[in-house]
Image (cartoon, grey):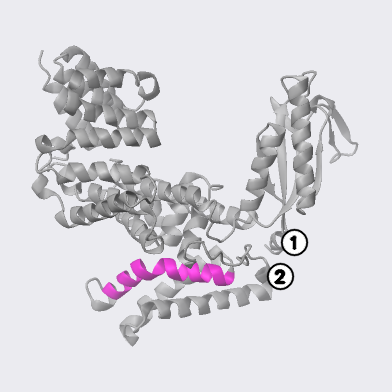
Amino acid sequence: MTDTPVAEAITRAHHDEWARVVATLARRFGDLDVAEEATADAYVTAVERWPLDGIPANPGGWLTTTATRKAIDRLRREARRDAKHQAGLMVSDDAPVEPAGPVQDDRLRLIFTCCHPALGMPARMALTLRLVGGLTVAEIARAFLVAEPTMAQRITRAKAKITAAHIPYRVPSAEDIHERLAGVLAVVYLVFNEGYLTGAGDRSLRTELTDEAIRLARLLRTLLPQDGEVAGLLALMLLAEARRAARVSRSGELVTLAEQDRGAWDRGLIAEGHALVRERIAAVAAGNGPPGRYQLLAAISAVHTAAPSARDTDWSQIVALYDRLVAVDGSPIVRLNRAVAVAELDGPGPALAEVDRLTEALDGYHPFHVARADLLRRLTRSAEARLAYDRAIALTGNPAERAHLTRRRDQLAG
Amino acid sequence: MARYMLSVFGPAERNEFGDYPSREAMLEAFADTGAFNEKLEREGHFVFADGLEAATTATTVDGQGERPVFTDGPYLETKEHLGGFWVIEAADLDQALALAAEASRACRGKVEVRPFQTAESFTALLGS
């Protein structure tokens, strides 16, 4: 039934309404399990009923009403078995709404609960994809290359911890929200990178992860339109997604930014990403605090994607942005990326000196050896470059990248 | 309100200053922990708190057989043992974690936060 108006309406309702239905039910019934199952049941009912009854005028309302009925039915059945079950709810939100606090949308509560710092990162990603994104357990398991029962158990355990440990269904207080939001954005960006960077697995499923991460960031942007880092993360992912088609050659080899066919970049996504970056530059100029790491990374991507060719890239601006990024996040990986930009501005010699200072911290990180190999190649130190390529090839799990590195290594003189 | 246990772990063998590097450090930690306990009482979180003697003073008892068996030493042979704990009441995990962070700072140790079973979870256990 693909391509029929009903199928399209159901897909759209899945993207647009799933999180809202789960979030509304979770608030009403105080139980994520009940909310998840009833929502899934409501979509099954939609698949059965909409072709016969027609698409409802308000699909979201129809789904919420149907899911609510399903939840009540389930709780009635369980109440017969166990009169006290309905009292066994998560701690519900009875705190007064803080006037200065962010918008109280149930979806925001759901996101903060799924990304609670007391849960492990794999559990946070899985819960967010299931409860907010509406992916099935089977889809999430395939995307993360784990067996379905393993993923099902991960999600079940996380939900059980939320209930047993009384993780609140609440948007954090104004004093905590900044740090907690950073945790949410980290989950979204990890989901994106899981789809974008990791080579293993089915490509279409990987696309599902990047699409879902962008959808989550769009949702966060709707819920927190004033937040600079939300805008920054969305822009960063859009500008990466825009280059997807140019990133891998027909033969499945990774294509570096310098060698990419810029005509194959998605201009619509780039325009959207650039508009967000411009909005943040204006906001920062207007005194809305210094930009955080996602805004700076997005600005760097914006400089890259604004250049008609790699040679025309404004490297001094990129190095200046990396300097600001190092001030926010002085991790070795950020310093490595800065050094790669320094190579374009000041030449491979000074860049190599900076890269070599990171050896101890990054010896097990394959991009470190890729950057070193490239700088040594440009300095015509072929023997050392070959060793560095070998190290990088041994450390990467991505077949497209391995193909690219092997070709580079084999092109070395002598 | 939900009830949580905050456990503090420390080395099996203690030096002359408990788990602390010096007498001054020990006294400072005791003073900070005392102040934290008073805050817990003042704000209605306090249920119980105390420190334990060294794990080497423990006796493990197995009463499941015909006669109880007594074994010298703690149940688990590990380098770190439970050294003390709080039982607190908090609105939810966020509040419990915030209190645990204060507890950790006061006693100079890592703190494990674990929820107690509730009437509902116990009933659910019986019903399953």
Can you give x and y, in whole percent of width and height, for residue B114 in the image? 68, 46
| Residue identifier under label 1 | B119
Q: Say the numbered circle drawn on residue A84.
A: 2
The residue lying at 26 percent from left, 44 percent from top is A299
Image quadrant in which you'd find residue A193: top left
Is A403 colored magenta in this rendering? no
Q: Position of residue A305 (x, y in %)?
A: 17, 45
Helix, strand or loop status at disc 2: loop
Residue type beneath disc 1: Ala
In front of the other: A278 or A28: A278
Q: Which residues are magenta?
A: A8-29
Task: Point out the residue furthest to the front here.
Answer: A286
Q: Quadrant of residue A156?
A: bottom right
Residue A294, how many percent across, how many down? Answer: 34, 45
Question: Element under label 1?
Answer: helix
Q: Using the image, determine if residue A366 lies above or below residue A198.
A: above
Q: Is residue A164 left or right of residue A301?
A: right
Chain under numbered label 1: B
Mark 1 Cα-neighbour bin, 10 Å: few <14, some 14–19, many ≥20: few
Q: Residue drawn at (63%, 47%), measured in percent from left and top?
A: B97
Tag 1 and tag 2, C-beta contact below 8 Å: yes
Q: Is residue A85 left or right of residue A364?
A: right
